Amino acid sequence: MELGLVTSNAGKVRELVAALEPLGHTATQRALEYPEVQAPTLEVVVEFGLDWLAHHYPGEVLLIDDAGLFVDALGGFPGVYSRYAWDTIGPAGVLALLGDGEERSAEFRCVLGLLLPDGGQRLFYGSCRGRVTRAPRGDGGFGYDSVFIPEGDERTFAELPLAEKNGVSHRGKALAGLVEYLGNSG
């Protein structure tokens, strides 16, 4: 299946293409813009985006996602506002908000939305528990990858090879659901 990846984030494109193309799915970045609403959940943001895309690009197969880093000690912030926080305070600002506090548990969450040619929609979810570092580490990945260590590891997402990150990350888990769906639906 040919999927149009609607994102301007090159890191997301790399992760999605790496997971989909070996399974025979063509994945290409689409430079389509759609309004991203501010909403209380990732799911609402993705559903709104899919509805808008279905209205403006009927008959296309498109994939969008929304993801966020939910830090327990910060009441889930930045969460659904992760992109805004990235643009304003960045990972350094999140680390400053945590200060020297011992509580550093967090969860990355992702919702992938698939728009089908008939206008149907499917959502796929993934999450990854872990903790926030005290300082950025690693050169790979994007976003908050340099400050997040997944459970069971001592390396940040930015220190993991892409295939290994895709095997444990929130986006990788959501992609696994998408891949299963594509395999079952033909």
Image (tube, rainbow, N blue to C red):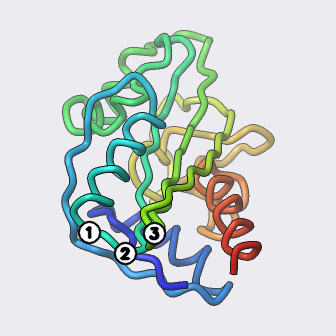
Quadrant placement of the N terminus: bottom right
47 relative to 34, above or below: above
The location of residue 41, given as percent across then percent down, is: 45, 28
Looking at the rendered structure, the kind of residue marked 3 is: Asp
Where disc 1 sits, the SS reads: loop
Marked residue nearer the N-terminal end (2 or 3): 2
Can you give x and y, in whole percent of width and height, for residue 95 in the image? Answer: 41, 24
Looking at the image, tell me whether mark 1 or mark 3 is earlier in sequence order: 1
Left or right, residue 127 beside residue 138: right
Is there a contact, CB below 8 Å, between mark 2 and mark 1? yes
Density class for disc 3 (Cα within 10 Å; few <14, some 14-19, many ≥20) is few
SS class of the residue under badge 2? loop
Crowdedness near tag 1: few (<14), some (14–19) or many (≥20) residues, C-alpha within 10 Å: some
Q: Nearer the viewer, residue 186 or 177?
A: 186
Res. 54 image quadrant: bottom left
The residue lying toward the viewer, choosing from 104 and 113, is 113
Q: Residue at x 67, y 33 (%)?
A: 130
**Label 3 sits on residue:** 118
Residue at image x 41%, y 43%? 47
Disc 1 marks which amino acid? Answer: Tyr
Going by the numbered disc 2, the residue's amino acid type is: Glu
* Point 63% across, 22% down: residue: 105
* Occupied quadrant, residue 184: bottom right
In whole angstroms, how far apart are the C-alphas of marks 2 and 1?
6 Å
Residue 31 higher or lower than 129, as above or below: below
What residue is disc 1 on?
A: 57
Total numbered labels: 3
Q: Which residue is mark 2?
A: 60
**Where 172 falls versus 66 (above or below)?**
below
Q: Position of residue 9 (x, y in %)?
A: 32, 61
